[in-house]
Image (cartoon, rainbow, N blue to C red):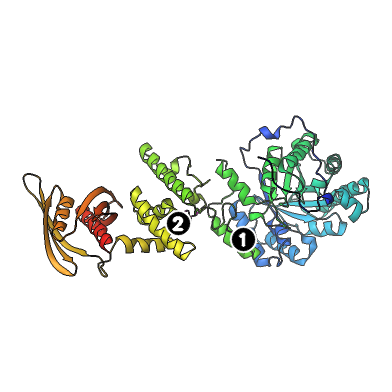
């Protein structure tokens, strides 16, 4: 079919094509991520600086403690030379005994000015493990417009800054501090690759990485400018061409301007990146930094340990929302209110069948569902693994079908409706949602179900209410049933005979002019143990109507009689 789209009036002439990287033998497309990279959280620096209302010291501390609890071992805690607030926060966590675990490295950011470098290093006095992160912009537009300098001028800024960091670290930090260094050619995505490599090599010539002396080279997508594949090509090129590679931690720092930061980070790791910098839930400047939670959970969903504990994702979210004074979007991957929820009828039916199949497989193999490989349609992970319940997996609106409604009844009330009864009840719910619009809650579904199928003895409805019954079986196997009942408001004693209690009850109903014929009968236990109850489902033809009824009782015979009453009363209601 021909493309019927028409040219727009958008000013596309203002924008040029992003330069591709020529790597005919690129290796990253054949790589797989089989182990988690090193993570650095920059929530307290890059994330905080992007807030309309930056975090108070108390909120910063709460975020720091959350990051430590989750298992992050590298945390950028601020820009201490930017102001007293950040400086004081860095000092507070260093000076408080036990605030920074021994295996956690804090990182601080600085520009390449001597006064800022001195203040930054000063903030780290007494730290057990600390990294100074120095950056300067290297892209052509910054060289021309911001700094008005040549390539050599920009390279010299990085070289001089590195030398100053080393001098002040030696001067101000004691032997108790395990000192590390990180350099970022800011706006790497717009910097010529040859020049980015030249600057990084010049920085390494000063720092002299080697055995036991790692340097972190961070290549930031300060503004995301290309497809993730082109970004991966740039990383692979740097990965191949950097000298002293075994002493370099190659780090990726994606932003989300094109909406592909997660893919860019994953492909960069495939292309050689050792470390990923980002923020929880993608907080950060403009469209945000890469989302560390999504990255970690993507690994988890592929059977790779993220080495970060996301098992209580709602607690992580609550802390994040409090500290950032922002809300997580309801469709945000893995954490949003609606991400494990299906409204579509076909999706709900598939989910229900998936759960049923998992339970059946577990029973057949004599194991628990948690011992099996996860395989439920439309649910990439088991919500329980991140602390979510199944309550919100299926929600019902006018687009929902029998699968969603029956899932709610089975999950919440242990009622496994026969297929044709599912169809019957879903039509009742459909009529309600069509009439009223919007979503119907599990509580409302149960209320409608009770009203339709389970008459309350305190507020009875329908032609017949049964109080007591007694059944006997003669030598020929014929059952005689006697029941005390109220029929059309009048107390009666009904007697009937048949091949089993249900047949006998049908015969008894004939005496009051109710003609009932059995079409289907199913039952199941609702729980185990001495107090277990049974649910009985009966499909009947009653005076030309085909209807289902349900009965619940600890005694299966009483449950089946209640199911007959349920169907009869529905027919005459």
Number of numbered callouts drawn: 2
Q: Position of residue 321 (x, y in %)?
A: 61, 63
Position of the C terminus, as image quadrant, is: bottom left
**x 78%, y 33%: residue:** 23
| Residue closest to the eye, 44 or 282 | 282
Instruction: Please check the rendered image and state whether residue 390 is part of the magenta-colored stretch, yes or no.
Output: yes
Residue denoted by label 2: 391
Using residue 347 as the reference point, say whether residue 234 is left or right of it: right
- Can you say whether 375 is above or below 433 in the image? above
Q: Are marks 1 and 2 in contact (CB under 8 Å)?
A: no
**Image: 493 above or below 264:** below
Q: What span is in magenta?
A: 387-398
> Residue 114: within the magenta?
no
- Please state if 310 lies on the left or on the right of 179 as rendered: left
Q: Kindly identify which residue carries mark 1.
A: 320
> Dividing the image into 4 quarters, which one contains the N terminus?
top right
- The x and y percentages for residue 154 are 90, 49
Estimate the x, y position of residue 224 in percent, counting from the top left.
75, 49
SS assignment at label 1: helix
- Quarter of the view holding residue 288: bottom right
- Determine which quarter of the picture holds residue 110: bottom right
The dot on residue 57 is: none
Front in this rendered view, residue 446 or 195: 446
In the foreground, 58 or 504: 504
Q: What secondary structure is the stretch in magenta mostly built from?
A: loop
Residue 212, visible in the rendered structure = no
Mark 2 Cα within 10 Å, few/some/many (few <14, many 20+)?
A: some
Secondary structure found at label 2: loop
For marks 1 and 2 on the same chain, the one whose residue lies earlier in the sequence: 1
Residue 243 relative to residue 279: left or right: right
**Closer-to-camera residue (68/374):** 374
């Amino acid at each position: 079919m021909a493309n019927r789209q028409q040219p727009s009036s958008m000013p596309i002439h203002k924008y040029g094509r992003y330069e591709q990287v020529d790597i005919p033998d690129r290796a990253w497309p054949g790589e797989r991520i089989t182990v988690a990279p090193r993570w650095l959280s920059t929530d307290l620096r890059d994330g905080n600086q992007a807030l309309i209302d930056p975090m108070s010291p108390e909120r910063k501390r709460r975020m720091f403690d959350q990051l430590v609890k989750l298992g992050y071992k590298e945390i950028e805690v601020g820009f201490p030379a930017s102001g007293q607030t950040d400086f004081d926060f860095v000092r507070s966590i260093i000076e408080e005994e036990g605030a920074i675990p021994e295996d956690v490295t804090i990182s601080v950011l600085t520009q390449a000015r001597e006064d800022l470098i001195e203040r930054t290093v000063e903030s780290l006095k007494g730290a057990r493990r600390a990294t100074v992160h120095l950056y300067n912009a290297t892209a052509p537009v910054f060289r021309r417009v911001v700094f008005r300098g040549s390539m050599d001028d920009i390279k010299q800024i990085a070289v001089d800054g590195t030398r100053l960091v080393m001098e002040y670290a030696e001067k101000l930090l004691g032997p108790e501090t395990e000192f590390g260094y990180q350099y970022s050619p800011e706006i790497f995505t717009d910097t010529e690759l040859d020049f980015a490599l030249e600057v990084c090599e010049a920085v390494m010539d000063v720092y002299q990485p080697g055995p036991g002396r790692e340097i972190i080279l961070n290549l930031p997508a300060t503004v995301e400018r290309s497809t993730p594949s082109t970004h991966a090509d740039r990383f692979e090129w740097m990965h191949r061409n950097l000298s002293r590679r075994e002493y370099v931690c190659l780090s990726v720092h994606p932003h989300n301007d094109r909406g592909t930061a997660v893919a860019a980070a994953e492909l960069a790791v495939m292309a050689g990146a050792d470390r990923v910098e980002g923020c929880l839930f993608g907080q950060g400047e403009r469209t945000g930094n890469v989302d560390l939670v999504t990255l970690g959970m993507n690994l988890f969903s592929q059977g790779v340990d993220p080495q970060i504990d996301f098992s209580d994702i709602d607690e992580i979210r609550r802390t994040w929302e409090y500290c950032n004074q922002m809300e997580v979007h309801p469709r945000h991957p893995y954490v949003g209110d609606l991400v494990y929820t299906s409204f579509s009828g076909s999706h709900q039916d598939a989910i229900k069948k998936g759960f049923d199949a998992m339970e059946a497989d577990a029973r057949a193999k004599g194991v628990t569902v948690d011992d099996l490989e996860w395989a439920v349609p439309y649910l990439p992970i088991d919500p329980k693994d991140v602390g979510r319940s199944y309550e919100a997996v299926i929600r019902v609106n006018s687009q929902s079908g029998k699968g969603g409604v029956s899932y709610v009844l089975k999950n919440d009330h242990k009622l496994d409706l026969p297929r044709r009864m599912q169809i019957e009840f879903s039509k009742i719910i459909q009529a309600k949602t069509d009439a009223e619009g919007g979503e119907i809650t599990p509580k409302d579904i149960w209320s409608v179900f009770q009203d339709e199928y389970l008459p309350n003895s305190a507020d009875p409805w329908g032609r017949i209410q049964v109080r007591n019954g007694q059944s006997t079986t003669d030598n020929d196997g014929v059952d005689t049933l006697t029941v005390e009942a109220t029929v059309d408001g009048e107390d009666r004693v009904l007697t009937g005979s048949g091949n089993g209690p249900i047949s006998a009850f049908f015969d008894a109903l004939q005496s009051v002019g109710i003609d009932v014929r059995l079409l289907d009968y199913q039952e199941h236990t609702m729980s185990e143990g001495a107090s277990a109850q049974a649910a009985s489902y009966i499909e009947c033809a009653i005076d030309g109507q085909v209807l289902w009824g349900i009965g619940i009782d600890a005694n299966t015979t009483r449950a089946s009689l209640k199911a007959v009453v349920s169907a009869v009363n529905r027919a005459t209601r």
